[in-house]
Image (cartoon, coloured by chain):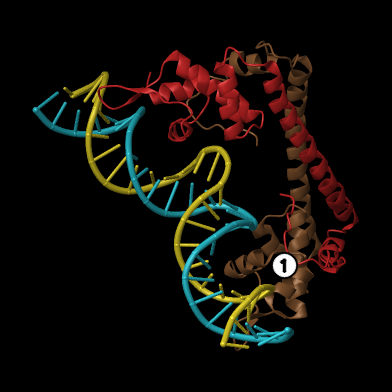
Chain colours: A brown, B red, C cyan, D yellow
Amino acid sequence: MNIGHASGRSGLPAKTIRYYEDIGLVSPDRGLNGYRDYSDRHVHILRFLQRARALGFSIEECRELLGLYQDKGRASADVKALASAKLAEIDEKIRALGELRATLETLVRHCHGDERPACPIIENLAEQGIPQERPARRRSAA
Amino acid sequence: MNIGHASGRSGLPAKTIRYYEDIGLVSPDRGLNGYRDYSDRHVHILRFLQRARALGFSIEECRELLGLYQDKGRASADVKALASAKLAEIDEKIRALGELRATLETLVRHCHGDERPACPIIENLAEQGIPQERPARRRSAA
DNA sequence: GTTGGTGTTTCCAGCCACTGGAAGGTCAAG
DNA sequence: CTTGACCTTCCAGTGGCTGGAAACACCAAC
């Protein structure tokens, strides 16, 4: 099966499938013409990756999951640990976004939204206290 | 005021401040020694950017907000539109993450997490139905 | 004056996970 | 034989920084 078909069956763009080969996740055979040749097994793995990515796992985490998937002697505890860590990450993201949301919502609610320049949103951005007198290392939310 | 001091007062790393100059957001004067020289006004703008970024606005949106901030004849409606769009984006992110969370949570809850290989998380990744028979364009959640 | 340490400059490379596009080879249909 | 869809490789770009190298500037101590 060539890459277009594998793309159709896995739900991943061909570009992404090639990329996954580049980084050593899925390596198909090659036909006489140089075309990649995917087996059902490969497609199965591609689907596995598609779903793991859709659940928010990073590429490196997907690599681990794939290793566990192919390890018949795996401990389900190892899989659960990965998933639990991801769950905690997601919870943290939701929490952080919730904070942003609350702030933004308050600002939007208080803005008249007319043709006059007065605007509590701009004022908040401009006038808030000095964030802290420290010299470096700051991470902001996305 | 040199860049280290501006960094301290704005809460942005020096690297980031230089980057903002690179992309034309904040352009300080230069001293005789070639050092960047920031005024209180510059620092004010840097803080503005720091807060806008922390609220989730992209660099390009920050550029717009900065333009509006400096535009005495702005319409607050324009600011509100930006903020409302951002709010909607955040809501969508929260919703999508909530879905992921629910799925992951169910999987984690059903996994024994012991030394045996049987694992509903892996099974779910491996066995779910074909995502769809379409050839291209797929975006997954982060 | 010299030493040393810290701060600053520029520039280049890398992160993540792709995505776009160019230039060319292959294949099946008409 | 041509057309067009598909495939190949390779290089560059995305966003928003971050790390690091090499060189220059500054300041205090000796």
Q: Is residue B106 left or right of residue B62?
A: right
Between residue B7 and residue D29, name the one nearer to us. B7
**Residue A11 sits in which quadrant?**
bottom right
Q: Secondary structure at mark 1?
A: helix
Q: Amino acid at mark 1?
A: Leu
User: As displayed, is residue B41 above or below residue A97?
Assistant: above
The residue lying at 73 percent from left, 14 percent from top is A114
Q: Is residue A52 visible?
A: yes
Task: Determine which residue is flagged by label 1.
Answer: A66
Q: Percent x, y for residue A95?
A: 77, 34
Quadrant in the picture for the N terminus of chain B: top left
- Mark 1 nearby-residue class (10 Å; few <14, some 14–19, many ≥20): some
Q: Mark 1 belongs to which subunit?
A: A
User: As displayed, is residue B67 above or below residue A91?
Assistant: above
The residue lying at 44 percent from left, 22 percent from top is B6
Q: Is residue A36 left or right of residue B131?
A: left
The residue lying at 56 percent from left, 23 percent from top is B66
Between residue A74 and residue B49, name the one nearer to us. B49
Q: Percent x, y for residue A33?
A: 59, 86
Between residue B10 and residue C18, name the one nearer to us. C18
Q: Is residue A70 visible?
A: no
**Residue C8 sits in which quadrant?**
top left
Q: Percent x, y for residue B132?
A: 83, 65
